[in-house]
């Protein structure tokens, strides 16, 4: 008698060696192995990894800085809270210093004075990944180290996949082939599946990076004399715990602390403004950093250099990262977003969440092709939107006021719109996500107009406003309220509450667009500033610095109900952050 398949009965599938084989045991692959075993303990999981323990303590991989979503993923979803607290450094937020003054303490500074309401961490990747190997194995995954994945052979017409690997150092060259129901490409920049299927997508402009690790604390607080008490006293926590960005036109330098007492130093640049040849050796890189902050020169050269790496044209995306044919790409094998906002771990969290759901749905015989298509669109739109938004600003990294406003804008969008979708898991629910996208449709148009506005404003900047120190938690209460309001509670909140919170954030974002537009007009088109203000509420999607387009684009025909009182409050709050230049 032949069994009849029903919606509750998984379709017949040939016997395989493992349900899931993850090619690559780095951060993304190991976290996914743990996540799969926790969510679906009946699934067998194998991780194939080339490197062997022990791993280098600091001179291993970059991607050391996390922000709130990624930190929440590691701490709560992977269960590493106690480990992170004891073995890694809590992060004192993202911090930016904008060049252009002869004396570093007089530069504009954007950062926090105390640790944030939600924790994030600075990760020593070697220490972390060695621990994750133990965590994944303890969860029931199998890990084979010291093997090189030569190929991933995708099964046709629903047949099992095959992963081919060989043992490193085996002079015979013998290979082993493992069959599986799901194969996950976590091979990093090798991107086996992406290259095999011709899925790679590049970004319009090349951006490059070099980095090195130092044996010692390259502490930015120590670069400023103790006689500058005003500078030291405005930040309570140690600036060394921040991800410090030393900004300049066309790029930035990062300084990231690593436990116990190492420092990661990197240079990130737009290639058309700073060719990689000016920093592609350690001596050149040291000179480059010292030129940006001379006070770091002597202490930097006194420390041992642990490693040095060069990465050209680092950002990439893909036409597809998830497949109903039971394969997926995660980590750098999927996408590599610009590192400016430390969002790499966020993207791991989202991708691994999608894969975990798909594997579980498939095991229950209800893998939905429409959901897979949705997941690809959602994830790739997020990754590409982040990178395009970030890289647009490299030419005006040296403009403190414009960059501070853009960063605040990005925080509003992230904390009030994007992050709640992770915390409340709405990204895993197509219907819920569609409802949120409907709310945010106007914000997308606003995002495009405001990004063009920042770029145009920078090209015509006259310096009407100046910035000394901006604490984006203490000094910006509306943003802080949205941040705290959207952090996860002990229990998931009703979807109606999530929608209400996101709607609140989108209203504030629309008001922020008005404030930014008026400030830009006062700087570059002061003759039009009062006239535009008299019109009151505006169509934020039509904001530009071209007066000839205002009527045609419908600037004075708003698409939403005016909120003059809350706009007035936010305008006062934002303007208090800046001084008007004499």
Image: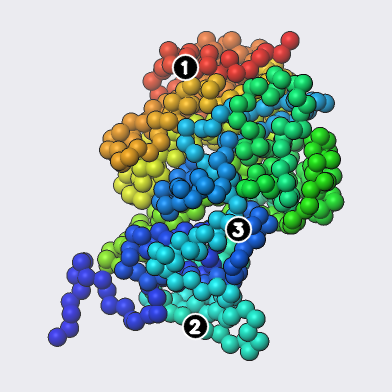
Element class at badge 1: helix
10 Å crowding of disc 1: few (<14), some (14-19), many (20+): many
- Residue 189 lies left or right of residue 246; in this view the side is left
Q: Which residue is mark 3?
A: 126
Expressed as whole percent of the image width and height from the top left, the position of residue 104 reads 77, 28
Spatial separation of the CA atoms under disc 3 and disc 1? 48 Å
Q: Which mark is residue 177?
A: 2
Expressed as whole percent of the image width and height from the top left, the position of residue 332 reads 57, 58
Say which of 219 and 532 sits in front: 219
- Reading the chain from its start, which is encountered first: label 3 or label 1? 3
Say which of 418 and 73 sits in front: 73
Q: Which residue is mark 1?
A: 567
Q: Is residue 18 above or below residue 220?
A: below
Q: Is residue 104 above or below residue 367?
A: above
- Residue 199 lies left or right of residue 322; in this view the side is right
Expressed as whole percent of the image width and height from the top left, the position of residue 561 reads 38, 20
Element class at badge 3: helix
Q: Are marks 2 and 1 in contact (CB under 8 Å)?
A: no
Spatial separation of the CA atoms under disc 2 and disc 3? 29 Å
Residue at figure coordinates x 33%, y 40% from the top left: 490
Residue at figure coordinates x 41%, y 48% from the top left: 76
Q: Quadrant of the N terminus?
A: bottom left
- Reading the chain from its start, which is encountered first: label 2 or label 1? 2
Asked if one can make out residue 457 in the rendered structure from this viewpoint, the answer is: no
- Reading the chain from its start, which is encountered first: label 2 or label 3? 3
Spatial separation of the CA atoms under disc 2 and disc 1? 63 Å
């Amino acid at each position: 008698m032949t069994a009849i398949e029903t919606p509750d009965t998984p379709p017949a599938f040939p016997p395989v060696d493992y349900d899931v084989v993850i090619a690559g045991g780095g951060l993304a692959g190991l976290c996914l192995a743990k996540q799969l075993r926790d969510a679906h303990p009946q699934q067998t999981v194998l991780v194939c990894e080339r490197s062997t323990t022990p791993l280098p303590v600091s001179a291993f991989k970059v991607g050391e800085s996390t922000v709130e979503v990624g930190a929440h993923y590691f701490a709560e979803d992977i269960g590493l809270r106690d480990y992170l607290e004891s073995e890694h450094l809590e992060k004192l937020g993202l911090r930016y210093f904008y060049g252009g003054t002869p004396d570093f303490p007089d530069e504009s500074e954007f950062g926090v004075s105390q640790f944030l309401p939600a924790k994030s961490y600075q990760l020593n990747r070697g220490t972390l990944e060695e621990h994750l190997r133990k965590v994944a194995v303890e969860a029931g995954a199998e890990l084979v180290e010291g093997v090189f994945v030569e190929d991933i052979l995708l099964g046709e017409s629903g047949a099992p996949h095959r992963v081919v690997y060989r043992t490193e150092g085996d002079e015979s060259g013998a290979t082993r082939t493992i069959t599986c129901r799901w194969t996950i490409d976590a091979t990093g920049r090798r991107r086996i599946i992406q290259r095999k299927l011709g899925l790679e997508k590049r970004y319009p402009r090349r951006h490059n990076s070099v980095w090195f690790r130092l044996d010692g604390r390259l502490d930015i607080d120590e670069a400023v004399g103790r006689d500058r008490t005003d500078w030291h006293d405005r930040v309570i926590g140690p600036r060394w715990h921040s991800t410090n960005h030393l900004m300049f036109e066309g790029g930035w330098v990062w300084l990231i602390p690593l436990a116990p007492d190492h420092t990661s130093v990197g240079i990130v640049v737009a290639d058309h403004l700073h060719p990689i040849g000016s920093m592609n050796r350690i001596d050149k890189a040291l000179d480059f950093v010292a030129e940006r902050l001379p006070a770091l020169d002597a202490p930097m050269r006194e420390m041992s250099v642990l490693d040095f790496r060069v990465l050209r044209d680092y950002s990439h995306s893909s036409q597809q990262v998830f497949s109903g044919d039971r394969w997926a790409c995660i980590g750098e094998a999927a996408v590599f977003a610009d590192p400016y906002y430390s969002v790499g771990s966020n993207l791991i969290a989202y991708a691994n969440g999608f894969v975990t759901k798909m594997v579980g749905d498939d095991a229950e015989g209800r893998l939905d092709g429409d959901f897979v298509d949705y997941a690809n669109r959602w994830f790739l739109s997020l990754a590409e939107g982040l990178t395009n938004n970030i890289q647009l600003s490299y030419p005006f990294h040296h403009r403190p006021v414009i960059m501070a406003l853009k960063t605040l804008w990005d925080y509003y969008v992230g904390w009030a719109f994007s992050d709640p979708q992770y915390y409340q898991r709405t990204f895993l629910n197509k219907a819920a996500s569609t409802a949120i996208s409907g709310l945010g449709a106007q914000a997308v148009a606003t995002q495009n107009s405001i990004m063009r506005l920042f770029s145009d404003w920078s090209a015509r900047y006259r310096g009407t406003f100046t910035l000394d120190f901006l604490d984006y938690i203490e000094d910006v209460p509306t943003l802080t309220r949205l941040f705290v309001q959207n952090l996860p509670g002990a229990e998931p909140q009703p979807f109606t509450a999530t929608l209400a919170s996101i709607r609140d954030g989108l209203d504030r974002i629309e008001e922020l667009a008005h404030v930014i537009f008026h400030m830009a007009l006062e700087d570059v088109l002061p003759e039009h500033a009062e006239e535009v203000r008299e019109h009151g509420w505006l169509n934020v999607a039509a904001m530009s610095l071209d007066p000839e387009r205002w009527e045609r684009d419908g600037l004075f025909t708003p698409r939403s109900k005016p909120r003059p009182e809350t706009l007035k409050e936010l305008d006062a709050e934002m303007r208090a952050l800046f001084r008007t230049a004499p």
